[in-house]
Image: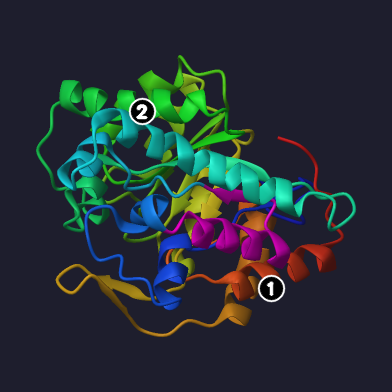
Amino acid sequence: MASGKSAIPFKILDGGLATELEQRGHNLKDELWSSRLLLDQPEEIVDLHCKFLEAGSDIVTSASYQATIAGFERIGLERKRAAAMIVRSVELAREACQRFEGKIEGRAGEVAAGVGPFGAALADGSEYTGDYSASKRQLYDFHIERWELLVSAQPDWMLCETVPNLQEAEVLCKIAAKTSIPVWISFCCPDGTKISDGTPIGGLAELIASAGVHGIGVNCTSPKYISELVHRIRDVSEDLPIVVYPNSGETFQSETRDWAGEADAGDFATQAEAWYQAGAQIIGGCCRTTPEHIRRLRGMRAAQHVDLGSR
């Protein structure tokens, strides 16, 4: 497929919810990560969703990436309340959209339910490597309960994030096939050719297209690899919708659960123009990207004279 100037419309996803909450002074260095605030400071989550919407996001992602029944039970919640917290994550994102609706003509926010991989629940950084032992049965059981809770809250999208290995992708495809809500499966990639376990990104594009999943994504990956990854997906499929939301370019240190390096919001938006030209349909940011990154993306889209379009 020739790259050229893309004719597709695109939407803007939000940025790094959890890392931005940390910048606000919240200590999220535990297994619940941003979902801890669902319990005692939900207004902080709503306010940050609103900040991303005001900056230019069309879609905000629920604070459910690391939210699990087992994780909430380990801090003392009864099962019923733990389940309610997972549903609440989508409700808070919807509340932010409702607050924002009408503030800017022609824009209304949508909600993506964030679905983290098995490795995220281990809280040891293994979602960036895929190096964990779990059978397909275990992975299915891990995902299905939370999945059904999130679907019950009626998000606009199901966004499977930072998937690091082929086996988990196959399980998520199986679950997605039974879901009426559009599903995106997004992968973490160490370079411009493959996901964390070494599976070529083109092979994942073939899997997702054949499974009837709505689209493929790349997230929490260095911005410098995104254009090549999009082109490799396009080599396999001209039609498969693509979402990209890389991190800021900084590197996660699993030992300290912190980030190293520097980020430039202006350079991020400049690179994003190439992702759009290559065929990305939804563009946003992952860890360490801020409302300023989203504001720059909005400006880039306006300069391209791109219509919002629909999914």
Foreground residue among 183 and 43 = 43
Q: Residue 237 or 190: which is nearer the viewer?
A: 190
Q: Position of residue 167 (x, y in %)?
A: 24, 31
Q: Local crowd at mark 2 within 10 Å, few (<14), some, or many (≥20)?
A: many
Residue carrying label 1: 296
Q: What span is colored magenta in the figure? A: 41-61
Against 177, residue 42 (above or below) is: below
In the picture as drawn, the residue positioned furthest to the right comes out as 105
Quarter of the image where one finds residue 55: bottom right
Label number found at residue 172 = 2
Dot 1: what SS?
Answer: helix
Q: Residues within 10 Å of mark 1 (few under 14, many from 20)?
A: many
Q: Residue at position x 54%, y 83% from top?
A: 264
Q: Amino acid at mark 1?
A: Arg
- Closer to us: 237 or 72: 72
The C terminus - image quarter: top right
* Above or below: residue 74 compared with residue 81: below
The furthest residue to the left: 133
Which is the main secondary structure of the residues drawn in magenta? helix
**Residue, far top:** 178
- Numbered label tally: 2
Label 1 vs label 2: CA separation?
33 Å
Query: How has the structure been colored for display?
Result: rainbow
Q: Residue at left 32%, top 49%? A: 195
Q: Is residue 266 above or below residue 303?
A: below
Give x and y (percent) for residue 309: 80, 42
